[in-house]
């Protein structure tokens, strides 16, 4: 079983990478921190998707701008980095600076491409349909984790992959597509394909990040995880800025702001709000990786994608056809299978540790 299955709460042998204030936390305090980070992740991701759809609905049309705001507010991540410095900062680096920079640049470019695919998908899909398709990232994550991170492919995980694939297929075959006004069937299909590709690429990105932590950087402390988020976001932001100018979309931004249905102030606030909420989501992602596991963080991220359609129903009055409701229920079933497998793996780790501790305490062993 992959080492990332083990909750950081019980990683007694790895405490050197944890800031000393967290080592003194009581169980209820740990749960409060976990709950706050879950709220950041779910709330931030749902709000950013809704604001992204609002940007397009009210007259925004720049795909590169929509891509840029997904990472542009990365300096916010310096706040938790400064508040909770790693106690292992004096530890020598496990690889060269050149290797670290290469990792950041490669992952940053992938993030920029992934964000562009998400931007195109959200342009041509309703917020609820977009979120349901994004939920397939858990299925892709299981496949990539099997090949890249040596994670076991159990019956429950296979069940999750099949169910999430069925959920996406139902959306794809839905003739009563609730595409935004003015979006043709061909553009709807393009949005579906781009969102599905973005989900696959995001899952590949997660596996590559985990591979980098385990095989190259050889550590996954709070500061290392957060620094990777910051510097890959910096690279992705630079790529988005280059794309904005190279595509010529920057010339349309002034007219776009003046023609925004809700006014120029609303235009600026929408973009700023989208940028900030994406980074609030990132804080939640990093926090859960640090406090629990990478897998748990991804599972909660997928749960938020199941919550977003309900928020879209309330905010945008998205249609919830019978097919879409069925797709959501199947996605939740697949999500539950994945979570239950994670629970079983967690119990196995705890049981093995308890047996090991009992053996060490037995003087006759």
Image: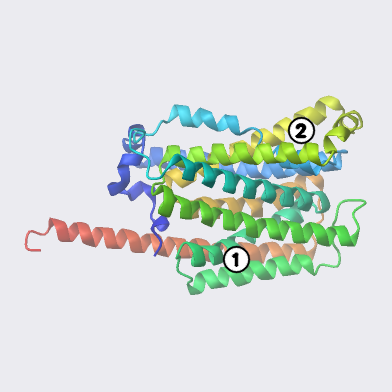
Residue drawn at x 6%, y 63% as measured from the top left: 364
- Residue 228 lies, in percent from the top left, at 51, 41
- Residue 180 lies, in percent from the top left, at 86, 51
Pointer 1 local density, CA inside 10 Å: few below 14, some 14–19, many at least 20: some
- Residue 170 lies, in percent from the top left, at 75, 69
Disc 2 is placed on an element classified as helix
- 300 or 17, nearer to the observer: 17
**Rendered image quadrant of residue 246:** top right
Q: Is residue 271 visible?
A: yes
- Residue 77 lies, in percent from the top left, at 55, 33
- Report how far apart the C-alphas of labels 2 and 1 lie in the structure: 34 Å
Compared across the picture, whether 38 is left or right of 164 comes to: left
Identify the residue under disc 2: 270
Compared across the picture, whether 88 is left or right of 76 comes to: left
Identify the residue under disc 1: 333
172 over 83 or under it: above or below: below
In this rendering, the count of numbered labels is: 2
- 320 or 241, nearer to the observer: 241
């Amino acid at each position: 079983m992959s080492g990332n299955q083990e909750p950081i709460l019980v990683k007694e042998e790895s405490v050197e990478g944890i800031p000393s204030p967290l080592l003194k936390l009581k169980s209820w305090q740990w749960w409060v921190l976990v709950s706050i980070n879950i709220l950041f992740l779910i709330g931030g991701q749902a709000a950013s998707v809704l604001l992204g759809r609002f940007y397009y609905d009210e007259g925004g049309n720049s795909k590169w701008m929509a891509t840029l705001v997904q990472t542009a507010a990365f300096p916010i991540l310096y706040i938790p980095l400064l508040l909770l410095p790693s106690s292992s900062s004096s530890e020598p680096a496990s690889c060269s600076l050149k290797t670290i920079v290469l990792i950041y640049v490669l992952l940053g470019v992938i993030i920029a491409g992934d964000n562009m695919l998400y931007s195109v998908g959200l342009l041509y899909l309703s917020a609820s349909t977009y979120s349901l398709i994004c939920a397939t990232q858990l299925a892709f994550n299981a496949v990539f984790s099997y090949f890249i991170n040596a994670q076991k492919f159990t019956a429950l995980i296979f069940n999750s992959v099949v169910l999430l694939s069925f959920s996406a297929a139902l959306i794809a075959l839905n003739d009563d597509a609730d595409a935004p006004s003015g979006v043709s069937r061909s553009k709807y299909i393009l949005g579906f394909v781009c969102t599905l590709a973005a989900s696959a690429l995001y899952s590949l990105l997660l596996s590559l990040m985990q591979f980098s932590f385990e095989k190259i950087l050889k550590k996954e402390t709070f500061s290392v995880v957060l620094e990777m988020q910051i510097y890959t976001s910096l690279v992705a932001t630079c790529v988005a800025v280059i794309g904005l100018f190279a595509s010529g979309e920057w010339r349309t931004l002034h007219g776009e702001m003046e023609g925004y249905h809700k006014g120029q102030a609303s235009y600026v606030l929408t973009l700023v709000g989208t940028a900030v909420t994406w980074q609030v989501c990132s804080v939640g992602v990093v926090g859960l990786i640090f406090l629990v596991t990478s897998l748990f963080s991804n599972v909660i991220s997928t749960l938020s994608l199941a919550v977003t359609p309900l928020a879209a129903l309330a905010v945008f009055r998205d249609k919830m056809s019978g097919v879409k409701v069925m797709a959501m229920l199947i996605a939740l079933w697949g999500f539950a299978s994945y979570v239950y497998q994670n629970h079983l793996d967690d119990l196995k780790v705890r049981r093995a540790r308890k047996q090991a501790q009992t053996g060490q305490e037995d003087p006759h062993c």
